[in-house]
Image (cartoon, rainbow, N blue to C red):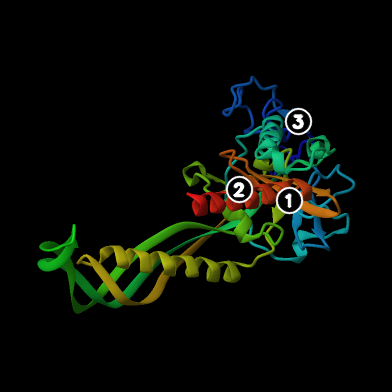
Amino acid sequence: MTELAHVEPTREDASPVVRARACPACGSPVEPYDKYCVACGTAQPGPAIAEAAPPKHFRCENCGAEVSIDPDQRSYTCAFCDSHYVVEFSPAETGRQAPEFVIGFAIAPDAAFQRFRQWLGRNGWFRPGDLRAAQIAEKLKGVYIPFWSFSTLARSTWSASIGEYWYRTETYTATENGKTVTKTRTVRETEWWSLSGGHHEYYRGYLVSGSRGLRQRDAERIKPFHLAALRRYEPYYLAGWLAEEYSVERDVALETSLQVFRQMERDAVAAFLPGDTYSDLRVETQFSDVGSDLILLPVYLLTYRYGNRLYRFLLNGQTGKAAGDKPLSGWRVGIAVAAALALGGLVWLLTRLL
């Protein structure tokens, strides 16, 4: 994979510039002068001395995704929607916030492709017979996706009806063998009372996709990322990889995050309540001390077409968690449905005859 160079500022009398690189064995970022890759242990060549051109930036006119690519790459196909309708732009024109943290790729491209093949083969009977033979390997791309990570303090007031169980013994009559008999049973009752109070909790680490190309519901499918592995962003982490510019603004992502934090706070209040059960829970929450980080996270994307439809495969480049969509074989699904209906009819007939 072509390297994306990173050049530190130098004075006229400074030493030659050192260029960071991706590990040739696994693709993980290798810092300057590292003798071994921290991900796979492969011995590394000496640091490269080179002048570096700035990366190119493209915007997809179809889905809105924006990426930074190797300056030597002359064309680009969107990793998100497989579109060729992309235009080059200057990031200086946007005034965007720079990334603050990054997690490097821990899954090598070859291993990522093997995981794709394994994923594609699951529940294979319902898939088209020629799906595995599709020429899609060259479209697997490793991309650093921008995510917004938020933290906030939630303060709430709440009110609810609290229920506490108690039990009583009840006497009743029943008919057994033609005779009336008296029996007892235990009945559960609930005593209710009103209660109100306050609650506060600090929430952090919820990730909102900063990419229009990677919708939030798709991002949820490959979570979690282990944020303990975050490192302060340096451009050399992107050596050899695509990197998308964020296209979802912070304020928009914050609204998504606060909706999740509000539900988390409601769940926390519900778990905090005394008694055995509750009803009519009302929670009013105010947020303060909101903080945010713009981070780049490793994701493999494979977008392919089958039967004039677009499908996508996603792989968490840190943990290897896979998700995506696969085409179904209509006639095989039809056979399965017909078999299920026939089996249901047989069971119904047997119950009527027995």
Dot 2 or dot 3: first in sequence order is: 3
Eye-nearest disc, 1 or 2: 2
Of 261 and 311, nearer the camera is 311
Give the number of callouts.
Answer: 3
Q: Are marks 1 and 2 in contact (CB under 8 Å)?
A: no
The residues tagged by marks 2 and 3 sit, at their Cα atoms, a distance apart of 70 Å
* Residue located beneath label 2 in the image: 343
Residues packed near mark 3 inside 10 Å, few (<14), some (14 to 19) or many (20 plus): few
Q: Within the image, what quadrant is residue 219 found in?
A: bottom right
Residue 19 appears in the figure: no
Mark seen at residue 334: 1
Residue 40 drawn above or below residue 128:
above
**Amino acid type, residue under disc 2 in the picture:** Leu
How far apart marks 1 and 2 lie (CA) works out to 14 Å
Q: What's the residue type where badge 3 is placed?
A: Ile
Rendered location of residue 164, percent (x, y): 18, 69
Estimate how packed mark 1 is, as few (under 14), some (14 to 19) or many (20 or more) residues with alpha carbons within 10 Å.
few
Residue, disc 3: 49
Pick whichever of labels 1 and 3 is earlier in the sequence: 3
Type of amino acid under label 1: Gly
